[in-house]
Amino acid sequence: MDLSEPVEVLKGIGEKKAELLRKCGILTVRDFFYTLPRDYEDYQAPTSIAAIRPGKIVIKGKIDSLSSRRTRRRSLSITEGVVRDKTGAIKVIWFNQKYRMKQFSPEKEYYFTGNYEFRQGRYTLVSPSAAEVTDVDIATGLSPVYVAHGKLKSADFRRLFNASRDRFSSVPDLLPSVPHGERGRALFDAHFPSTHEAITAARDYLAYEELFELILASKLNRRENDKLKAEPIHFDAEKIKEFVANLPFKLTNAQRMASWEIFQDMMKAVPMNRLLQGDVGSGKTMVAAMAALEATLAGKQVALLAPTAVLAAQHYKGLAGLLEPFGVKSALLTGATKGKNTLKKQIESGEINLVIGTHALLTDDTVFSQLALVIIDEQHRFGVMQRQKLMLKSPPGLAPHLLAMTATPIPRSLQLTVFGDLDVSILNEMPKGRKQITTQILSEVEINERLYPMIRKVVSGDNGKKTTSALDGKPARSKISNSSRRTNQSTPSNGQQVYWICKAIEEGAYGSSDKTQSEVTSVKSRAKKLCDVFPEYRVEFLHGKMKPAEKDDIMERFAAHQIDILVSTTVVEVGVDVPNATLIVIENAESYGLAQLHQLRGRVGRGSLESYCYLLTTGDVPPSRRLRELEKSTDGFHLAEVDLKLRGPGEIYGALQHGALDLRIASLSDTKLIHKAQQDVERFLQNPENMVKYKELMQGIAKYQQITTLN
Ligand code: ADP
Ligand code: MG
């Protein structure tokens, strides 16, 4: 049996069904067989209706009086009816599942399982799953539940699989390291389990297969990368020493180590493919600066790609001045840059050595003459295609060295699998003198009594510490240069600054019918409130819909301490560096992921001053585990592990890189299985013939190869 054939070759799948399947991305027999159940319902041992108790129940009966209506809050449809057996009848209700109207015929018998609970004055079976009795394997009572895709509901999938039931035994083997027939058996058991143990065994096999493919893909990427040629870059020890000696601070050991690793990579004739991981504030930019210096000293060009204009501008201001004494000519290229054409000519002629920019760098008319190093800040913000575009700007036949940076630490288990053979440098040490950030969860009702006084204390400079501008008391170099241009009316206080993060841009931006979302207080109205509460402070707001120039202007003024309180959406999330900001309030904290909260919190605690983070929650519900973990720890690596446990790899991965890694089964916390798969992949790769012999495997991993590579 050839799994790559179109689904139509299967019994019960005609033109129409095939079209529906195609719409959900199921094209081949393989796609179809690997459409695995989301869950299993256990219809074993149904109770008679007369004997049921509140809680989870299984019953068997017929359904009548089915009707559907919309609630006054138009968004919700309610389908309700009555389930009967010989002993009695109960009410049943579904929300937003109108298709239930068509699912049942009055003369047929169905299993139902769900929660039997008290709702609006009576006991009701709430949103049960249901299956026709004849569809469920009587012997086992286990029924798979499939994710509904458009018109195809779970029951439709069950029926379709039933029609191909006998085909699973002829599914060909995929992996060399597994007994013959195990793949077909696992797939069969996943769709037609006879026991709970069979489900577990099927999942074990499928998880192993998935990990094997993922790890193989990542190792092959490494091999392919090593076949590419890059310009070796000479290590100029003298100049680097001089550069380091001129810095207003001492490099951390971690920074030294990382830059050493990078120099080593760049000296090779194969492209560097390195990820620099470091918590917010760990000083990744300085490491990037040294790499850039090294490349430009060798007469090459460097491109630094940043996700936002604000960040690109900040990098430009930070780096251009530092590198200029070494003869490095830098330029900023963003959407808002004036005179792009002249600039692009200078890039093409090689006159400009270091180009720092946003997506504007990626356009086809940005041509380099000697691009040899690409640095991507916050790499997870960019898609594979975008990164690739930049990589292709090197001279023909050559690939640039790549340094990707991220503040979202990759948990070790992900590193072993997804980024298997990627080179990683870690900045696990904060610059000296950083203070821990005190984090606290506050309920909104505590704003007046607890938060406002704290803000007043911080902004008025009564934060227990003498205010120094940054970095162990030394004046920060290369700060915003034109701050004097518009020095503010009010005397610049010696106090510190505050970020206040809100979710929406305007009241009701999410539609006002939804209660939870209208609770989201907008940037604008929050800014207005704060103006009223603190008339003596300079309050401004910032959000993503503003023009780039406006945003830059606000950020510049904030950096120059012409603004005391900046109310903003998450546009300040990434990398923005204002060491004098020491207090951050995150409104609706529950609505963010752990990694993002940690990123946001990283906007403060960047200097040597005591810093604070307040997580505001709206409701009466106790704070989630996520928030409590954040309160306890400021260690990004620890938080990443926690996040992985709490949310699973899909979510985490999504945050790391665009292009979803759809690990359907494997759990990345299963280190034992990961190790086994790793070893088996090693063995597989030792025999080059395998690459030819295992065709299906090699074709199948192409999809992973796209996402396990950095370039
Ligand atoms: P991130 O890793 O979050 O990108 P940055 O590179 O923006 O961090 O660095 C954060 C701040 O720390 C910057 O103001 C930078 O100048 C400063 N910094 C970097 N390295 C050191 C160091 N070794 N000692 C003191 N301050 C440093
Ligand atoms: Mg940064």
Image (cartoon, helix red, strand yellow):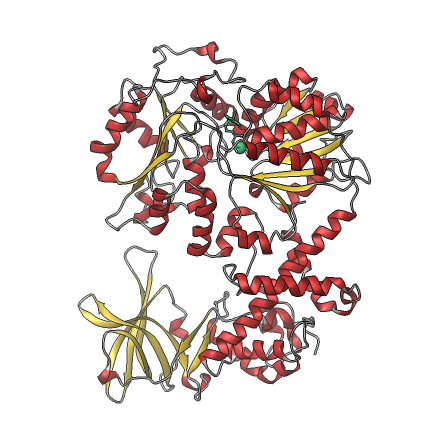
- Does 652 sit left or right of 80 as displayed? right
Residue extending farthest to the right is 397
Q: Residue 568: tell me if it is visible.
A: yes
Residue extending farthest to the front is 253
- Does 135 sit left or right of 534 as displayed? right
Instruction: Where is residue 132? Give x, y as percent.
Output: 42, 82
Q: In this view, does 469 lie above or below 711?
A: above
In this view, the residue in front, 22 or 469, is: 469
Q: Please tell me in which quadrant of the rendered image residue 703 appears.
A: bottom right
In this view, the residue in front, 483 or 681, is: 681
Q: In this view, does 134 lie above or below 17?
A: below
Q: Please tell me in which quadrant of the rendered image residue 604 appears.
A: top left
Q: Please tell me in which quadrant of the rendered image residue 72 appears.
A: bottom left
Quarter holding the N terminus? bottom right
Q: Residue 22: tell me if it is visible.
A: no
Instruction: Where is residue 259? Give x, y as percent.
Output: 63, 33
Q: Measuring 67% from the left and 71% from the top, which residue is drawn there? A: 175
In this view, the residue in front, 504 or 595, is: 595
Q: Is residue 27 above or below residue 344?
A: below
Instruction: Where is residue 442? Give x, y as percent.
Output: 27, 40
Quarter holding the C terminus? top right
Instruction: Where is residue 419? Give x, y as percent.
Output: 61, 51
- Does 274 sit left or right of 617 as displayed? right
Q: Measuring 66% from the left and 55% from the top, which residue is drawn there? A: 218
